[in-house]
Image (spheres, rainbow, N blue to C red):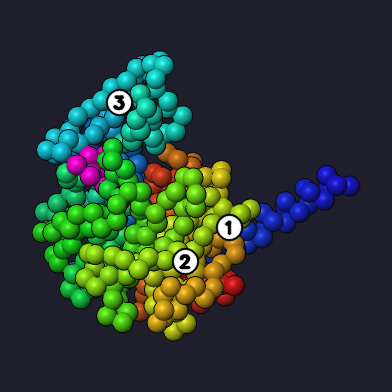
């Protein structure tokens, strides 16, 4: 009797979660896969495409994709690239049978007490006339890691536009840790490097696309492995570069789909009811889903509501199987003129770029 009850309750919980998935996935998914683009350097192979920042420019939809590359692998060794502070690349090779090598995670290896990424990421622009079919435009630069804070690459960029300036917040990775870097541009050909705006360990930074009471606001995620956790924080700034007045606004929830970590997606969307933010959450089994929360329009540190179940979870084959499966992860979307439709572009299984549409009204109906 007890065993039957457990099985039934587990099934009901799974059905409830599946019913909460309200994403209308593009029939053309995946929109981009690694073989669709050319490696940046001869001898390298694109292992995966991940988590694009999204924006409109020149009447087109653009994505700034994280492209992760590694050398073509040999049978008996693991090899991976790192950047030197001068910008030159070094390839490190380690024998697979080396007793000091730990390589259980396809994303990170540990060798002689130090951690390394298995791939080196840069950011690459693609654009589309219809928001579905993307190609790489000519005469636009790759955005590469630069300096000692970015020797392991740059990742997962969020793009926010204020006035005539685009703010690019991205994850800067090096042996010193994981931090948040900022670059700005007006034309996507010349960029100003502003350096690190949040030190390690921090990521998932998205700047609001409107000032509130003359202040800039941004989500970010400092992390703690001992006390605290991987939570979403809010900060404010007088100039978009110097940040303070930090406050924790969204935490993980024990026993739920976002029990292990949460992190912001793109800049929140302004609605009549508040700032609507789409975020990612993961459980202890590293299954990544999307949820949403609502902030007060005038006091964004005040959380008004949050979804209990995910609004999107990995269900399709291209979301379940890839470089790192069971992942849907977004840091970019387009809000349409009808003031209800959102096109979310997302990374699937840490390998493919996909698209889905949501209704703001429908998302809000799931907020508690």
| Rendering coords of residue 77 (x, y %) | 34, 19
> Vertical placement of 57 versus 36: above or below?
below
Q: Residue at x 33, y 63 (%)?
A: 206
Badge 1, how many Cα within 10 Å: few under 14, some, many 20+? some
Q: CA distance from mark 2 to mark 1?
A: 13 Å
Residue furthest to the right in view is 1
Residue where numbered disc 1 is placed = 253
Q: Is residue 215 left or right of residue 246?
A: left
Residue where numbered disc 3 is placed = 79
Q: Residue at x 45, y 64 (%)?
A: 248
Q: CA distance from mark 1 to mark 3?
A: 38 Å
Q: Secondary structure at mark 2?
A: strand
Would residue 46 be visible to someone looking at this image?
no
Label 3 vs 2, first from the N-terminus: 3
Asked whether the beta carbons under mark 3 and mark 2 sit within 8 Å of each other, the answer is no
Q: CA distance from mark 3 to mark 2?
A: 40 Å
Residue furthest to the bottom in view is 272
Quarter-of-image position of residue 212: bottom left
Q: Which residues are magenta?
A: 148-155
Badge 2, how many Cα within 10 Å: few under 14, some, many 20+? some
Q: Secondary structure at mark 1?
A: loop
> Vertical placement of 22 versus 103: above or below?
below
Would residue 4 be visible to someone looking at this image?
yes
| Rendering coords of residue 292 (x, y %) | 49, 66
Please name which of the two marks, 1 or 3, marks the residue nearer to the observer: 1
Which quadrant: the C terminus? Answer: bottom right
Residue 151 belongs to magenta span:
yes
Task: Compare residues 39 and 285 and report the one nearer the observer.
Answer: 285
Quarter-of-image position of residue 222: bottom left
Residue where numbered disc 2 is placed = 249
């Amino acid at each position: 009797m007890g065993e039957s009850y457990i099985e039934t309750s587990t099934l009901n919980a799974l059905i409830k979660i599946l019913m909460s998935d309200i994403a209308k996935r593009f029939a053309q998914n995946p929109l981009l896969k690694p073989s669709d683009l050319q490696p940046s350097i001869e001898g390298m192979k694109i292992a995966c495409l991940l988590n694009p920042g999204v924006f409109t420019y020149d009447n087109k939809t653009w994505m700034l994709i994280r492209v992760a590359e590694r050398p073509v692998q040999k049978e008996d060794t693991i090899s991976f690239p790192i950047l030197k502070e001068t910008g030159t690349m070094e390839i490190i090779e380690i024998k697979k049978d080396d007793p000091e090598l730990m390589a259980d995670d396809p994303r990170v290896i540990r060798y002689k007490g130090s951690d390394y990424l298995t791939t080196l990421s840069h950011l690459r622009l693609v654009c589309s006339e219809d928001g579905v079919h993307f190609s790489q435009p000519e005469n636009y630069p790759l955005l590469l890691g630069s300096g000692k804070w970015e020797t392991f690459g740059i990742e997962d960029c969020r793009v926010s536009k204020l006035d005539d300036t685009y703010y690019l917040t991205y994850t800067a990775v090096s042996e010193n840790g994981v931090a948040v870097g900022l670059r700005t541009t007006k034309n996507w050909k010349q960029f100003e490097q502003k350096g690190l705006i949040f030190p390690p360990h921090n990521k998932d930074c998205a700047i609001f696309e409107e000032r509130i009471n003359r202040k800039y606001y941004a989500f970010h995620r400092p992390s703690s492995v001992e006390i605290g956790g991987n939570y979403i924080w809010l900060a404010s700034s007088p100039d978009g570069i110097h940040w303070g007045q930090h406050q924790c606004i969204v935490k993980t929830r024990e026993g739920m789909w976002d029990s292990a970590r949460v992190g912001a997606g793109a800049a929140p969307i302004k609605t009549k009811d508040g700032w609507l933010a789409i975020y990612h959450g993961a459980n202890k089994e590293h299954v990544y889903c999307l949820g949403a929360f609502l902030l007060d329009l005038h006091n964004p540190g005040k959380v008004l509501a949050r979804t209990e179940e995910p609004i999107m979870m990995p269900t399709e084959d291209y979301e379940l199987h890839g470089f790192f499966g069971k992942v849907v992860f977004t840091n970019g979307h387009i809000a349409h003129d009808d003031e209800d439709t959102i096109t979310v572009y997302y990374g699937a299984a840490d390998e493919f770029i996909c698209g889905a549409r949501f209704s703001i009204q429908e998302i809000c109906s799931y907020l508690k």
